Amino acid sequence: MRLMTERQSDMRRVSLDWLARRDYSRVEITRKLKRKFGKEGGDEVDADIAEILGWLEEHRFLDESRYIEVLIRSALERGHGLLRLRQDMKQRGLASPLIEQALLELDVDWFEQARGLRERRFGLKAVVDQKEKARQLRYLQYRGFTAERTPLPSPGHCIALTHSSSMRNADDPDYIIIPGNRIFGHQQAWPRQRS
């Protein structure tokens, strides 16, 4: 980097202050710098911002792949689904190829994520009426889960997930395991019909 002007020095200092608190995408830092320094001069400010961003990336202060990892971890902790996660990253100005690559590398059971979220919010009670089912589906869809990944148990059966503690009911002789049931991608335990 050539000898810096006072404005470039201020831009670098302000950018480092922001990045010391949390990660940002390149687009977010650009917006913030333009808001702070944009009124001083048009093209010169854009050139200075591009130079500062290059310096930040070169020294790994600005790293979008690290930022994506942080966003994914945070979204999973908050119980967000795939659709909401993808949308959040796009709104932050991250490049689509980076987003898609990161999501492909994810090893997340989205059904289990939705099931856990539903349990925390609504409990284990079976969904009895359509109004309640619609309310729970809307909640899960708002959180970023698709209708195929929304576990809503109905009366008369319990879902026994293959890798869950609820599998203990499957050993009960009053339940029949139906292997390969593809409704939710997991096995289901249905009450045995008494004759």
Image (tube, helix red, strand yellow):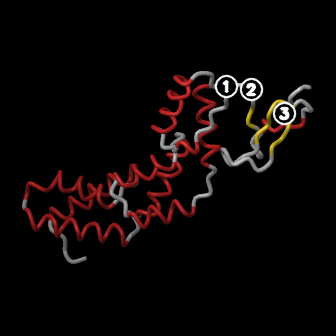
Task: From the image, tell me which residue sits under label 2.
Answer: 156
**Spatial separation of the CA atoms under disc 3 and disc 1:** 16 Å
Circles 2 and 1, Cβ within 8 Å, touching? The answer is yes
Judge by depth and name the residue closer to the eye, 44 or 100: 100
Mark number displayed over residue 80: none
Q: Position of residue 145 (x, y in %)?
A: 52, 43
Query: In which quadrant will I find the N terminus?
Result: bottom left
Placement of 167 over or under 23, stated as above or below: above
Q: Position of residue 31 (x, y in %)?
A: 23, 55
Q: Position of residue 49 (x, y in %)?
A: 21, 65
Q: Is residue 50 left or right of residue 172?
A: left
> Upstream in the sequence, badge 2 or badge 3?
2
Q: Is residue 89 left or right of residue 8?
A: right
Judge by depth and name the residue closer to the eye, 20 or 153: 153
Residue under the point 46% across and 57% down? 68
Q: Secondary structure at mark 1?
A: loop
Task: From the image, tell me which residue sits under label 1.
Answer: 126
Q: Residue 170's quadrant in the figure?
A: top right
